[in-house]
Image (tube, helix red, strand yellow):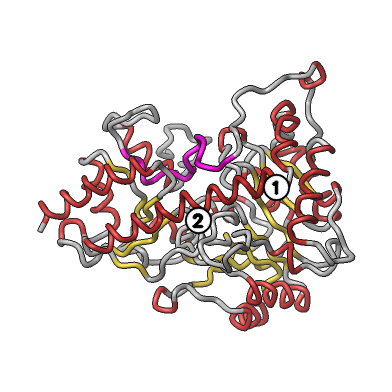
Amino acid sequence: MDESGFQAFRQVPKTGVIYVTSEATKRGFSPQSADWCNLGQGQPETGELPGSPKRIDTVAIHMDDQEYAPVAGLWELREAIASLYNSLYRKGHGSKYSAENVCISGGGRAALTRAAASLGHINLGHFLPDYTAYEELLDIFHAFTAIPILLEGDRGYSFTSDDLRREVLGRGLSAVLLSNPCNPTGKLIGGDELARWVSCARELDCTLLLDEFYSHYIYRGRPGQLPIESAARYVEDVDKDPVVVFDGFTKNWRYPGWRITWALGPKSVMESFASAGSFLDGGGSKPLQRAAVPLLAEDHVIAETMAIQEAFRKKRDILLSRLERIGVRFDRAPDGTFYAWGNVSQLPPSIAEGMSFFRAALDEKVICVPGEFFDVNPGKRRSGRVSRFRDYVRFSFGPSLDTLDRAMNRIESLVARST
């Protein structure tokens, strides 16, 4: 009999964040626990930041909001999203996005699940390391075959368009899934390199499925330039180029509890996603979708993005500096996201692996995520008991600066006692 205790059910693995949170909960953690420091969290701080627009704290519910929303989302929200992308990324392009190029979902995982359910019998490339939730997502649908592509830390996790071309042709890939900027490494594919990726995808008819949920958390770029990036900037024809991007209010607008996300791509693909949503999830919250429309005004987006940039760059620099001082190594400073991907192998032996560091940190009421959770291995088909990322830990600088300071004080004390 299965570990679930019932013959009919299998053991469903926990994603990294859920696992570490459940382990911390056994020791007394709750989201309201003021004495815990959660550097494992996958969400940003959600309060007002200096220079950010006023946060929404009430939502009006219209009478017709008691009914279901369309599976593809409210038309006015879809129009607003298309308009924003056209304004930010499509100036000077003849081909523009419309509401029909947008499909709304109730959360990022729901959007990605719709995409996975819509894929045919293909080879799908994915990267190592990458977002932990991809593992089960890539295993549960059996129409496609997931092909892992290892990124090397000693190359700074670089992967060029030439590398992409070689993998697509050599492995017969019809689609590639990745987070950009990458969760957990923070590596960004941007500018001319991202343009070459889109060109390669167009030429080889290989669909790029780009998780852009951290695309407003970018710490490089020219002064005065809005620190955002999207593959939508480099698409030639919005209905012919094989490019689908995923984003939402979860990270870039800092409203994770709203569970409003979207896919943006060719109309025919969005129709497939909506069809998949009709049997997978049925669509998202109607009142919250309606309330979200004003958040897509360009001036609101610019103000929020610049506030994020100021606050999170500062937190990134402080966290990296303090972790490096105690011996944590970084293959690269994160270009984006709010994560630091640190190698702990040079710390004292008792905490020199990701899992042992995580468990010791729990004793200090600090949560982080061991690197092995990002060794995406759908169906556990790859052999080997030891993860190639066992020496790594993902540290989130999503929490407030005060929380980061308290967490680092405790981690520094832990390292000093372990020496």
Q: As displayed, is residue 386 above or below residue 159?
A: above
Q: Going 57% across and 41% down the picture, which residue do you hit? A: 52
Determine which of the numbered discs, if any, sits on residue 158 in the image.
Answer: none
Left or right of 416? Residue 294 is right
Q: Answer whether residue 176 is visible to the viewer in this image.
A: yes
Q: Earlier in the sequence, mark 1 or mark 2?
A: 1
Measured in 3D between alpha carbons, the distance from the residue under mark 1 to the one under mark 2, in whole angstroms, is: 24 Å
Q: Is residue 71 left or right of residue 292?
A: right
Contact (CB < 8 A) between labels 1 and 2?
A: no
Quarter of the image for the C terminus: give it.
Answer: bottom left
Residue type (three-letter) at the residue carrying disc 2: Thr
- Element class at badge 2: loop
Q: Which residue is mark 1?
A: 114
Which residue is located at x 16 percent, y 49 percent? 413
Question: Which residue has dot 2 on it?
Answer: 337
Q: Nearer the viewer, residue 221 or 127?
A: 221
Q: Is residue 264 left or right of residue 324?
A: right
Asked if residue 330 lies left or right of residue 234, the reply is left
* Residue 51 falls inside the magenta stretch: yes
Point out residue 410 in the picture as x, y percentages from the top left corner: 21, 45
Q: Is residue 82 magenta?
A: no
- The foreground one among 97 and 353 is 97
For marks 1 and 2, give the one nearer the viewer.
2
How packed mark 2 is, by other alpha carbons closer than 10 Å (few <14, some 14-19, many 20 or more), is many
Magenta segment range?
A: 37-52
- The structure residue drawn at horizontal position 48% and vertical position 72%, both measured from the top left corner, is 150
Residue placed furthest toward the top: 63
Residue 385: in sight, yes or no?
A: no
